[in-house]
Amino acid sequence: MMMTKTEIAGELRALGLRAGDAVLLHSSLSSLGPVEGGADAVVAAFLEVLGETGTLAVPAFGKLGVIVERVKAHPRVVVSVHPLAAVAAIGAGAEAFCRDHWKAELAHGPDTPYTRLAEAGGYVCLLGVDQDRNTTLHTAEELLRLPYLKTTPEQTFDTPEGSVTRAWPFFPGPHRDFIGLDRLFRESGKMTVGRIGRAVVRLIKGRDLIALAVEALRRDPAAVLCANSACADCVAQRAAIRQARLSAESFRLVVSAQLAGRNVPEIVEQCRRAGVGAVEFDGLQGKPVEILSDDTLVRAVEALRAEGIDVTAIRACSVGARAVKQVARAAACGVRRMVMPLDAALATEAVAAAREHGIELSFYNTVQDSDTVSVMLREIAGRNLRVGFTFNAPRFAGIGEKPFLGSFRKTLRRQVDQLDVSDGLLDGTPRPLTEGQAEIKELVSILRCAGFDGPLVLTAQNRQAGDTLPSAVHRFISLLDAI
């Protein structure tokens, strides 16, 4: 059965639209079914309902359907000047809504048609389309300046004041899952859902829509990103959120190269997916760093840096008499920090080599108790040799100590310049973060409280506990959110 303009106008009034209202319309003509007069009849029905004091607006960038094209072709249309986010409007508020759109800092933010219409009490109407077509949801993202938003390339375009070249920060990116917000809007009671012809119609005040979306995105900045691990766009955008989350901390999160992957391409890919930009290089292809050839080590470090991954330190797991050589190898790679097992017999030579090469040296505990470690570190310091200490909580737990209450607070607190972030049981068995007895939550919390600015390193021990780099980073951020 073919719908008429009069029938469409009646249904719009039944949804709650009245004369004097302003509406930002997103639409699909085909969803309505047969319409006598086609898109022109739909536009005419809206204008009849809104009257002389009302305003009909549509997003006018790209190809958004035949109804948009009919609005743009209307003799009374006003189109905002913007190469990426233009709006076309007809009616009493058209000039006010569209004025100087291109001058606004953000494409969909304050002083744009999207916020002006909302502030005027206007509606967003989805006619036969879902929330994925709802451009005003970009307003919520931009108002929060979410970390996954990008600055656009510069655009040159004509304005009433002449040719202008500019870019817009915090512009929405590629993929969104706005559909997931529909339930939120329905359950809030703010959105009316009805039907015109075959089309489902959603109507909500713009200010309510923005407020609800902002609240949802403030709670969870990834609320409109999909959870599909095969969606490269949303994986990258989630990584940007994690990166921004971590950059707010005083410490720097670094990850073990061996936790990230077996080879350089895998390490780079996993670091990008996890939103981490720094590695402690401890091996490749399952081989610890000390048995890699000099050429392999140098090439791996150079390749990581070429991909934008910072190599903060070289970490050896067993150096023996080769401690001096390992320090020299770190220097040859241009890495200014070396982390190695604490060995009193080799400490003097290793520290001397570090001083010679301009390398920062930090020792970590292996099987020593905290009192022994403290004595060894004091003896090294007594010889005017400066070193740091990398605190490995699971190893203290594995010899029966309480890492936070005992090893750290009573003995080693002032000597720590790095924390290995991993967990384990009292028998030495590796466990995922916060599922062991290494008191890692307490350690991270006290270091945050003290404004600790050294590295916190997700070590390869997390892989032994069954975690991948993404899952270990997720656990770590969950740990931060819980304290």
Image (cartoon, rainbow, N blue to C red):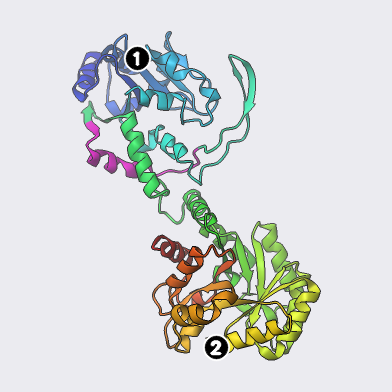
Of residue 136 and residue 367, the one placed in the foreground of this image is: 367
Pick the quarter of the image with the C terminus.
Answer: bottom left
In the image, is residue 185 part of the stretch drawn in magenta? yes
Amino acid found under the numbered disc labelled 1: Asp
For residue 32, side relative to residue 361 (left or right): left
Identify the mark at residue 40; answer none if there is no mark: 1
Mark 2 surroundings: few (<14), some (14-19) or many (≥20) residues within 10 A: some
Instruction: Determine the secondary structure under disc 2.
Output: helix
Q: Looking at the picture, does residue 129 appear above or below residue 117?
A: below
Of residue 297 and residue 448, the one placed in the foreground of this image is: 448
Where is residue 150 drawn, in percent x and y?
Answer: 55, 41
Pick the quarter of the image with the N terminus.
Answer: top left
Front disc: 2 or 1:
2
Q: Are marks 2 and 1 in contact (CB under 8 Å)?
A: no
Where is residue 356 drawn, in percent x and y?
Answer: 81, 75
Where is residue 420 drawn, in percent x and y?
Answer: 54, 74
Q: Residue at coordinates 28% horizontally, 39% vertically from top-left?
A: 185
Q: Residue at coordinates 29% horizontally, 14% vertically from top-left?
A: 20
Q: CA distance from mark 2 to mark 1?
A: 84 Å
Query: Is residue 393 something that shows in the picture?
Result: no
The part of the chain drawn in magenta is: 172-193
Where is residue 193 drawn, in percent x and y?
Answer: 23, 32
Q: Residue at coordinates 41% horizontally, 60% vertically from top-left?
A: 481
Which residue in the protein does label 2 denote? 371
For residue 177, side relative to residue 364 (left or right): left
Q: Looking at the picture, does residue 329 appear above or below residue 70?
A: below
Of residue 251 and residue 320, the one placed in the foreground of this image is: 251
Amino acid found under the numbered disc labelled 2: Asp
Quadrant of residue 120 within the rendered picture: top left
Upstream in sequence: badge 2 or badge 1: 1
Mark 1 surroundings: few (<14), some (14-19) or many (≥20) residues within 10 A: some
